[in-house]
Amino acid sequence: MPNFVLFGAPGAGKGTLAGKIKKFSPIAHISTGDLFRYNIKEGTPIGKEAKSYIDAGKLVPDSVVIGMVKDRIALDDVKEHGFMLDGFPRTLDQAKALNEIAKLDVVVVLDIAKEDLKKRILGRWSCPKCGEIYNIYNDELKPKVEGKCDKCEDTNLTHRSDDNEETFEKRWNTYLSQSEEVINYYDKTEGLVGRVDGTRTMSYTEDELRKILKL
């Protein structure tokens, strides 16, 4: 099985694409968000170190993030089935560190225009009861009744507090400042980059994904 990275801006659809891939492949899905939550919850040494930075309101340094990824890649399921990384690497230093840990077969870049991504994130509402996701800017994902869940009709939809324009602009600018270096590194140095349309993450077929991922 190949080892690959899903690379794109926050909200571009990396998790959605990973979920589709998991339906037909036993490959290990490694999300840095999940790694943080697991290590902090279990009180592992590296989780305690990460928590100390988070509690102090500081960014967790690359060395800690890389350590978490390295430990996860060493597990048996990865050795048997390969891995797909979601949320790592984000920076050129992380990409170079990953290159020393494992060999990649492809880096899947999810391309999406800023305005399309903004509508996806700022229009996102969810049901606190069943978890169903809606989007007020997408006719296919709009709730039948404004502000109400289609499945739980008595339940009001909620909107994440950080799904706002100011936070979006910060995340987008951070992504832009870091992504070019990373993509160029993988494209020019390693020749690994494959691009997909980030607006189509829900509609990619298994055959299309297998071709992209060289499965």
Image (cartoon, grey):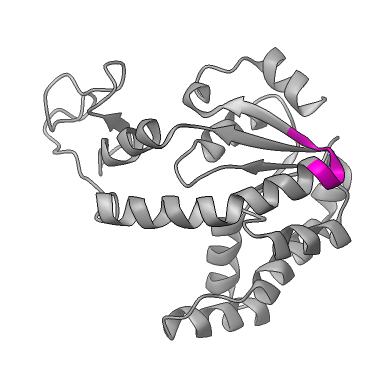
Q: Quadrant of residue 28?
A: top right
Residue 40 % position (x, y): 55, 73
Compared to residue 154, the image places residue 93 above or below, namely below
Q: Is residue 174 magenta?
A: no
- In the image, 127 versus 207, the foreground residue is 207
Taking 76 as reference, is 66 left or right?
A: left
* Residue at screen point 52% across, 17% down: 203
Residue 44 % position (x, y): 64, 77
Taking 152 as reference, is 36 left or right?
A: right
Q: Is residue 175 visible?
A: yes
User: How many discs mark residues in the rendered view?
Assistant: 0
Q: Is residue 125 visible?
A: no
Q: Quadrant of residue 194?
A: top right
Compared to residue 66, the image places residue 56 above or below, namely below
Q: Quadrant of the N terminus?
A: top right
Compared to residue 203, the image places residue 130 above or below, namely below
Taking 101 as reference, is 122 left or right?
A: left
Task: Look at the image and give the residue range highlighted in magenta.
Answer: 188-193
Residue 46 % position (x, y): 66, 78
* Residue at screen point 61% across, 76% down: 61
* Residue at screen point 57% across, 78% down: 50
Q: Is residue 190 magenta?
A: yes
Q: Quadrant of residue 57?
A: bottom left
* Residue at screen point 52% across, 50% down: 176
Q: Quadrant of the C terminus?
A: top right
Taking 204 as reference, is 160 left or right?
A: left
